[in-house]
Image (cartoon, helix red, strand yellow):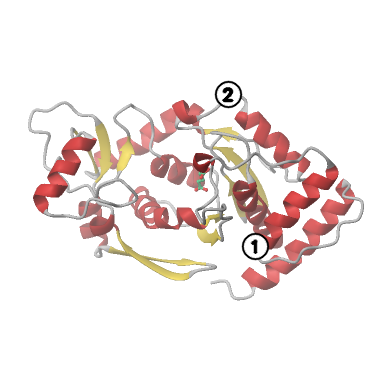
Amino acid sequence: MIRGRFAPSPTGELHAGSLVAALASWLDARSLQGEWWVRMEDVDGPRCIDGAAAKILQQLSLCRLHSDGEVIYQSQRTDIYQQALNQLIAKGLAYPCACTRKEIEEQQVSLGLSLERHKSAVYPGTCRNGLDGKPARAWRFNVTQWSTLRGSHDVHWIDRRLGAQVQNVQEEVGDFVLKRADGLWAYQMAVVVDDAAQNISHVVRGEDLTDNTARQYLLQEALGFEHPHYLHTPLVLGVNGEKLSKQNDAKALDLSSPRAVCLAMQSAASTLGLSTLKLHSCDSADLDEALSTWTQEWTQKYLSASP
Ligand code: GLU
């Protein structure tokens, strides 16, 4: 069974960038005759906005993108993430960590390691061998231990658009967080558990998330899950050349009229290198026809040479 998914974080409405991920994952699933499921990644409660999930579903529906499965909400799945963490603890692959962000930065400086990695320091493994009497704050994945068990520090994976990828997670990221000091589940843990629980075979998402894939590969291995296929899409850039995101105030999509919906979809398709179709009336039949043409184009572009 082929199954793709779109997994927005309801920290705001859809914007032009998230519509690209929604459309790409939908086209990919359809071109493989598979299902497309929507999952709400509302695991970081404080960052979520009331009503955003419902609004996103409404926006998707205006764009003729409907989930084939029940929409699940990560905020309701904490027990499942805890079970996965318990499994890792039992295997000696997760450990509690007492370090504060400030302490990690100080450890970095004293070890002469580079401080910046997307503004968060590479964790030097301070609590790997015990807490030294300090209270536990977060839970971390023992990358070092798992890399030793799997026989390599390098994680190799293939992106269906970007080609062969490799990352040494231990050196470039360190033992990453599974459960945060504030008790919330880390994205890596929730996404890996849910992709497996929902039998997602094909992950299609924005290129800004590419760097997470090696970590997700390691967790999938350690939990005995299969790896989905991955494809990371081009990003929509804002005027400053940076990725459009809710953080840099990407405007909500204008979907206020059929014409506006067509323009938004045409622009998402063009970011994906698909042709700008002439949409005449912009009614749902017109949009469905465009989706079917884009599905054929997607097949030619990404499926003929896919691994
Ligand atoms: N929830 C993530 C986001 O909105 C997407 C995660 C994923 O597709 O793996 O950026």
Badge 1 local density, few (<14 within 10 Å), some, or many (20+)?
many
Q: Is residue 27 above or below residue 88?
A: below
In the picture of the structure, the residue carrying the numbered disc 1 is 272
Residue drawn at 64 percent across, 56 percent down: 24
- Is disc 2 placed on a helix, strand or loop? loop
Q: Quadrant of the N terminus?
A: bottom right
Give the residue type that dot 2 points to: Asp
In the picture of the structure, the residue carrying the numbered disc 2 is 50
Q: Nearer the viewer, residue 267 or 88?
A: 267
Classify residue 30 by image quadrant: bottom right
Residue drawn at 30 percent across, 41 percent down: 177
Q: Nearer the viewer, residue 230 or 290?
A: 290
Q: Is residue 24 visible?
A: yes
Q: Position of residue 194 (x, y in %)?
A: 49, 42
Q: Is residue 221 above or below residue 7?
A: below
Give the residue type that dot 1 points to: Leu
